[in-house]
Image: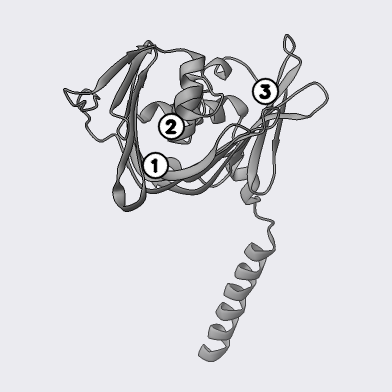
Amino acid sequence: MKQTNILRITALFLMIILMQNCIPSKPDSEERLLPADRLIKKIEGNRRKVKTFVGNGIINIESPKFTGNASFEIALKKPDSIKISIYGPFGIDLAHGLVTKNSFEFYDVMKNNLYKGNSSAEILREIFKIDLSFNDLVDAFSGSINLTDKLTREPDYYKQNDDDYIMTYINEKTKTKSVYAIGVDNLALLNFKTLDEKNNTIIESRYRDVKLFDDVPIPYKTDVKLTKDNQKLSLEYRKIEVNKEIQRLSIKIPKDANIIQW
């Protein structure tokens, strides 16, 4: 009798387990699905958490006027300062640049020339060899994108795939579309591109090898391509530090440097 009761209890226990297993579980994709407004706030919130950014690695530039790569160090102090140093073989100093929204200094070590003046689109092209605005450069080097103007606007199209969220915004004035791909698992920016009215790509950025810094996803590899101008900027970091305390950014200029005002 005792053995029969044990068998009955065991059978009942197995039935309960089987019944639970037969109940369809809620798909992971549904559990992770975020409304567009929350997703945008999370992405923009992560971008704003990064106050300073320091890194070093390899920079590669391809354009009709210039093609080359070099070791570099970058220091960003948001919202308005970029310091970049370029090194040749065996760590030889080649150049140091300091750019803000209002002014710039660029020191050519080999020629001992210091170029300085007011910041402009032309100056940025001369220094970085690619046609990006100051804010675009900050975003490119820190592997982020500014979504401030999207915080109060729903995307025109919003979709979730297995691995990413896709947000599309249409600009009626310029007849362009901005498309963002965001990773489902870590909310990392994976891809951004702007398309013209014929769906031709104007600019595209790809972000890879993402790692978390205080829960903020930062890519170690970034590629920015300007299709029309046939320009490409590639960054591959060896080391990154986020929100490290940085004093006022500056570059050391020898007293005998030739100063050239632009």
Q: Nearer the viewer, residue 112 or 144?
A: 112
The circle drawn on residue 155 is 3
What residue would you read off at disc 2? Answer: 46
Q: Secondary structure at mark 3?
A: loop
Question: Which quarter of the figure has residue 228?
Answer: top right
Q: Secondary structure at mark 1?
A: loop
Label 3 close to label 1 by CB (< 8 Å): no
Residue 119 lies left or right of residue 241; in this view the side is right
- Tell me the quadrant of the picture where the N terminus can be found: bottom right
Residue 191 lies left or right of residue 186; in this view the side is right
In the image, residue 23 lies at what x, y percent?
68, 58
Q: Nearer the viewer, residue 190 or 15?
A: 190
- Tell me the quadrant of the picture where the C terminus can be found: top left
* Mark with earlier residue (3, 2): 2
Q: Is residue 7 above or below residue 119?
A: below
* Mark with earlier residue (3, 1): 3
User: Looking at the image, which residue sits at the far right?
Assistant: 198
Q: Nearer the viewer, residue 22 or 187?
A: 187
Amino acid tagged 3: Pro
**Disc 3 versus disc 2: distance between alpha carbons?**
19 Å
Residue 262 seen in the current view: yes
Label 1 close to label 2 by CB (< 8 Å): yes
**Disc 3 versus disc 1: distance between alpha carbons?**
25 Å
What residue would you read off at disc 1? Answer: 215
Q: Is residue 106 above or below residue 225?
A: above
